[in-house]
């Protein structure tokens, strides 16, 4: 057994033991709530998980603080997560009703359900004209995304992060990230015959008729498992309408990859249902964190102080940015600059649907994991990468759904609201118009050539395009502006950012592989120059 495999085995055992015992602290050795740790990581998403593994492997005792809970205990129905057709309290983070991206079907409220308030797996954070979907739990967004593991086109990566060595990223860190994440590719022959991807083949045909290219996309969902799902040899997950509220089988989320390996080093502890509210620096240079503990019903159990010499912010574009905006504007980290909170973007997300002809059925069985996209990114006028997304309703819908990623130059800024004690996003609905315009040019052509039309019944009103939410929040603590070129926060020693807030608003594809690879690059440098030399 390789060292990495052994670490993953030990980590998975620790996760299983914690679940069986109902623990909120996960470790491979006895661990309680510490008052000090050499390194603390806020969050357990992609960048945080990378950082934890590399710190743990280097022998650095590390505590990870996760707002959500550990998701590996089946409920009464025998499943850890609910499906999209029958959501319950597990679906949403302290909501009275689910808030799915599709708000209606045939203008009827058939999608969302009333639920009990609970520490569920998906949160929709609402900021007026913009809502942001984020994962809550050990593994962050890896629990609730569509598993599309896409490496950005090098030419665009060089545009968005021109001071990062692309040779190094594409020669070393992107391959490392994909290997660690468990990226795999669909069998093209199986794709052509799979009932679960009839919906994608229908959209491909329409795109090709209009002169657009399509491309298969890698995934961290096991396509071999999915093939067996279709043959009904294993329990269904992707083929059981499971995606935005978690997958019970088949997906290599971070708790099965990086986080399991991190726990297996013996140097990493994860504390769950734990929210960091404030950060301050003490006279000796260490960082003090105000940490609030809650239970799964939201009851506050207590607040404690935790100190760390090295502090890594991996709470995602919203979480990390809010912590530093609050710290700056309340005077707890007064040397933070005006760059904190800037450069935030939606990755150009816009969702739309098309109505197909009656002779082009999409099928009753649709995989929740997209495997194909319309690739028009090299178009200088309308650069668009459109995921061919499922509508896993379990019935024939004749609908094609897309999540388009566009090159939208608009950026938002986070400001501190002292009355609400939160960072508030400044973003107007009009800032989504460039995304709509780009997508409309592509899909107007597809509809014109194929004689099809838009769906106007999906978003709770009569709009055909929905740009008022994003699955891909990026920016707020931009690399080379709010930080140096390796995520070190300007003005403070031993304070780091290690998540999607480093990326200036856009990657041109689903961003988690980029976030992972960038975190691998950054922690390599930090370990070599800051921690090992300390």
Image (spheres, grey):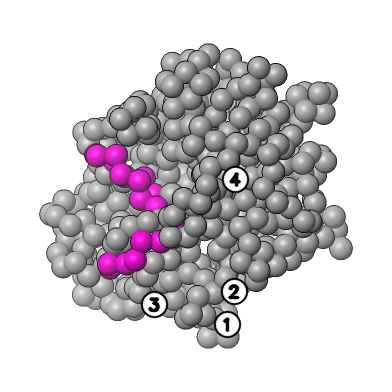
Specify whether residue 337 is painted magenta: no
Residue 135 visible in image = no
The label on residue 65 is 4
The label on residue 365 is 3
Q: Residues within 10 Å of mark 4 (few under 14, many from 20)?
A: many
> In the image shown, does 257 or 387 lie closer to the viewer?
257
Q: Secondary structure at mark 3?
A: loop
Q: Is residue 297 above or below residue 492?
A: below
Please name the residue that numbered disc 2 is placed on.
225
Please identify the quarter of the rendering in which residue 420 is found.
top left
Tell me the CA gap for discs 3 and 2: 16 Å
Q: Quick check: marks 1 and 2 in contact, CB under 8 Å?
A: yes
| Camera-nearest label, 3 or 4 | 4
Q: Earlier in the sequence, mark 1 or mark 3?
A: 1
Q: Quadrant of the C terminus?
A: top right
| Camera-nearest label, 1 or 3 | 1
Q: Secondary structure at mark 4?
A: strand
Q: Quick check: marks 3 and 4 in contact, CB under 8 Å?
A: no
| Camera-nearest label, 2 or 4 | 4
Q: Is residue 148 above or below residue 350?
A: below
Q: Quick check: marks 2 and 4 in contact, CB under 8 Å?
A: no
């Amino acid at each position: 057994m390789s060292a990495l495999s052994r670490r993953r085995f030990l980590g998975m055992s620790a996760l299983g033991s914690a679940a069986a015992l109902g623990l909120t602290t996960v470790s491979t050795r006895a661990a309680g709530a510490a008052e000090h740790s050499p390194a603390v990581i806020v969050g357990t998403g992609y960048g945080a998980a990378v950082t934890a593994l590399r710190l743990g492997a280097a022998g650095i005792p590390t505590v990870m603080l996760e707002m959500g809970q550990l998701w590996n205990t089946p409920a009464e129905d025998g499943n850890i997560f609910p499906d999209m057709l029958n959501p319950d309290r597990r679906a949403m983070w302290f909501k009275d009703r689910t808030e799915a991206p599709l708000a209606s079907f045939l203008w009827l409220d058939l999608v969302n359900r009333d639920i009990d308030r609970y520490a569920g797996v998906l949160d929709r954070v609402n900021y007026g004209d913009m809502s942001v979907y984020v994962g809550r739990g050990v593994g962050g967004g890896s629990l609730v995304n569509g598993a599309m593991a896409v490496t950005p086109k090098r030419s665009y990566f060089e545009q968005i992060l021109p001071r990062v060595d692309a040779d190094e990223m594409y020669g070393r860190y992107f391959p490392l990230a994909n290997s660690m994440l468990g990226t795999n590719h669909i069998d093209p022959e199986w794709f052509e015959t799979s009932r679960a991807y009839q919906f994608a083949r229908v959209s491909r045909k329409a795109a090709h008729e209009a002169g657009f290219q399509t491309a298969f996309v890698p995934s961290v969902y096991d396509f071999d498992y999915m093939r067996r799902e279709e043959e009904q040899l294993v329990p269904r997950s992707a083929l059981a309408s499971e995606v935005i509220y978690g997958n019970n089988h088949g997906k290599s989320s971070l708790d099965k990859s990086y986080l399991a390996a991190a726990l297996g080093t013996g140097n990493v502890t994860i504390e769950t249902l734990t929210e960091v509210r404030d950060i301050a620096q003490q006279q000796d240079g260490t960082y003090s964190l105000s940490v609030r503990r809650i239970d799964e019903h939201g009851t506050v159990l207590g607040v404690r102080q935790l100190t760390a010499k090295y502090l890594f912010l991996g709470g995602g574009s919203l979480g990390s940015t809010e912590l530093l905006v609050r710290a700056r504007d309340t005077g707890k980290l007064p040397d933070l600059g005006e760059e904190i909170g800037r450069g935030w973007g939606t990755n150009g997300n816009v969702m739309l649907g098309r109505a197909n002809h009656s002779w082009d059925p999409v099928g009753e069985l649709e995989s929740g994991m997209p495997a194909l996209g319309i690739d028009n990114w090299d178009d200088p006028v309308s650069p668009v990468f459109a995921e061919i997304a499922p509508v896993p309703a379990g019935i024939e819908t004749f609908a094609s759904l897309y999540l388009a990623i566009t090159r939208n130059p608009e950026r938002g800024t986070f400001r501190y609201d002292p009355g609400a004690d939160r960072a508030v996003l400044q973003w107007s609905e009009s800032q989504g118009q460039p995304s709509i315009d780009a997508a409309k040019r592509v899909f107007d052509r597809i509809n014109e050539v194929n004689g099809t039309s838009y769906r106007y019944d999906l978003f709770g009103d009569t709009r055909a395009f929905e740009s008022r939410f994003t699955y891909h929040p990026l920016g707020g603590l931009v690399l080379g502006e709010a930080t140096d070129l390796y995520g070190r926060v300007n003005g403070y020693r031993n304070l780091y950012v290690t998540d999607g807030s480093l990326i200036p608003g856009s990657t041109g594809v689903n961003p988690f592989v980029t976030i992972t690879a960038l975190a691998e690059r950054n922690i390599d440098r930090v370990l070599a120059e800051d921690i090992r030399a300390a």
